Image (cartoon, grey):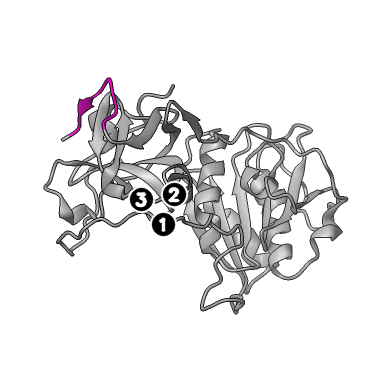
């Protein structure tokens, strides 16, 4: 299991509002809709096409900039939103999680361009996918897993080269293949025009919460800039596993500690307190008020997190 991620900026954002409230029983929470959340209200697409861009290119070179240039040359009206370019080189699963966590916040019709491509220049296929009311472009290596796991996904292998930037580089398909395809999709080119539908895209396992001995067991999926450890346990997972149980009655076991109850907001606890809290992505997070929980606990991707009711055995209490 991964133990630590690379150096992180310390500190956690704090909510200004303080004060507590009596915990109420948990009501069943409907599972998060796979449909994207439209900007400006239900059913209202953006007035200009949006292309998000995720990669492992970093910011020290010109790679991100020239991809922007190719997009704007092909679709000048497109707005490009950089989600992140700090994916560790070749870390496909990390980028796939970023897409899963972020795509639902974009309106229908958004094009998600994602390039973490260790197999660039080989016979791996470029893909264009229509899924969940949005479009996804990237290599066929599991990066687009969140789009692919939708049973209604329409998956196309990109075989038409007419929109590619020629000559196509052996090492920079983000610029020469994926960016032109994403731009043309954003400008209204039908996804089917890029190639035939396929039924065998490369998939990567999506960790699924499991139940064992009265516990709901998940894992750390991502450690953010503040050292918060995001898990694969969603609010709906907790509601399904512990219906009508107050959040204050739950215990979270992680890294040999037990955190009693779920926090409401950061500001309800004193600095240095370890919290389990439902974060903005709808997932259970392990955080430290005013600090870096992942560094303190030595947490990394893949580490186990278990949730139960009442006292959880074999762990020291977290303060």
As drawn, is 86 to the left or to the right of 180? left
Secondary structure of the residue carrying tag 2 is helix
Secondary structure of the residue carrying tag 1 is loop
Task: Choose between 140 and 184: the one closer to the eye.
Answer: 140
Q: Does the stretch in magenta take in 316? A: yes
* Residue 31, quarter of picture: bottom right
Task: Tell which circle, 1 or 3, labels the residue nearer the N-terminal end.
Answer: 1
* x and y, in percent, of residue 186 in the image: 68, 66
| Closer mark to the observer between disc 1 and disc 3 | 1
Task: Tell which circle, 2 or 3, labels the residue nearer the N-terminal end.
Answer: 2
Mark 2 in CB contact with mark 3 (< 8 angstroms)? no
As drawn, is 9 to the left or to the right of 209? left
Task: Tell me how many marks there are.
Answer: 3
As drawn, is 135 to the left or to the right of 64? right
Task: State which quarter of the image contains the C terminus.
Answer: top left
Per the model, the C-alpha gap separating discs 2 and 3 is 12 Å
Task: State which quarter of the image contains the N terminus.
Answer: top left
* x and y, in percent, of residue 55 in the image: 54, 45
Task: Tell which circle, 1 or 2, labels the residue nearer the N-terminal end.
Answer: 1
Task: Choose between 147 and 89: the one closer to the eye.
Answer: 147
Q: Is residue 228 visible?
A: no
Per the model, the C-alpha gap separating discs 1 and 2 is 7 Å
Residue that carries the numbered disc 3 in the rendered image: 278
Callout 3 crowding tier (Cα within 10 Å): few <14, some 14–19, many ≥20? many
Which residues are the magenta region?
311-318
Per the model, the C-alpha gap separating discs 1 and 3 is 15 Å
Residue 27 is marked as 1
Residue that carries the numbered disc 2 in the rendered image: 239
* x and y, in percent, of residue 248 in the image: 26, 47
In the image, what residue occupies the spot 33% across and 54% down? 25
Which is the main secondary structure of the residues drawn in magenta? Answer: loop
* 69 relative to 209, above or below: below
């Amino acid at each position: 299991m991964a133990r630590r991620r690379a150096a992180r900026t310390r500190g956690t954002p704090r909510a200004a509002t303080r004060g507590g409230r009596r915990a109420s029983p948990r009501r069943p929470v409907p599972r998060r809709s796979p449909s994207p959340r439209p900007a400006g209200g239900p059913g209202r697409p953006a007035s200009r096409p949006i292309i998000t861009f995720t990669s492992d290119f970093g910011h020290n070179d010109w790679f991100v900039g020239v991809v922007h240039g190719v997009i704007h040359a092909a679709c000048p009206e497109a707005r490009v939103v950089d989600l992140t370019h700090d994916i560790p080189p070749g870390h496909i699963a990390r980028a796939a999680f970023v897409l899963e966590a972020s795509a639902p916040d974009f309106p229908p019709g958004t094009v998600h361009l994602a390039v973490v491509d260790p197999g660039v220049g080989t016979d791996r296929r470029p893909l264009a996918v229509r899924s969940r009311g949005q479009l996804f472009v990237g290599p066929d290596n599991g990066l687009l897993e969140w789009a692919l796991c939708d049973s209604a996904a329409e998956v196309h292998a990109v075989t038409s080269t007419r929109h590619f930037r020629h000559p196509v580089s052996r090492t920079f398909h983000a610029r020469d293949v994926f960016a032109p395809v994403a731009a043309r999709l954003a400008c209204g080119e039908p996804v089917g025009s890029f190639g035939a539908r396929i039924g065998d895209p490369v998939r990567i396992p999506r960790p699924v919460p499991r139940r064992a001995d009265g516990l709901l067991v998940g894992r750390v999926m991502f450690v953010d800039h503040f050292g918060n450890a995001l898990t694969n346990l969603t609010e709906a997972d907790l509601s399904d596993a512990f219906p009508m149980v107050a959040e204050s009655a739950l215990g979270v076991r992680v890294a040999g500690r037990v955190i009693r109850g779920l926090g409401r907001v950061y500001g309800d606890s004193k600095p240095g307190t370890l919290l389990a809290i439902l974060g903005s992505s709808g997932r259970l997070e392990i955080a430290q008020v005013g600090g870096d929980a992942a560094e303190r606990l030595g947490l990394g991707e893949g580490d186990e997190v278990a949730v139960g009711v009442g006292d959880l055995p074999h762990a020291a209490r977290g303060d």
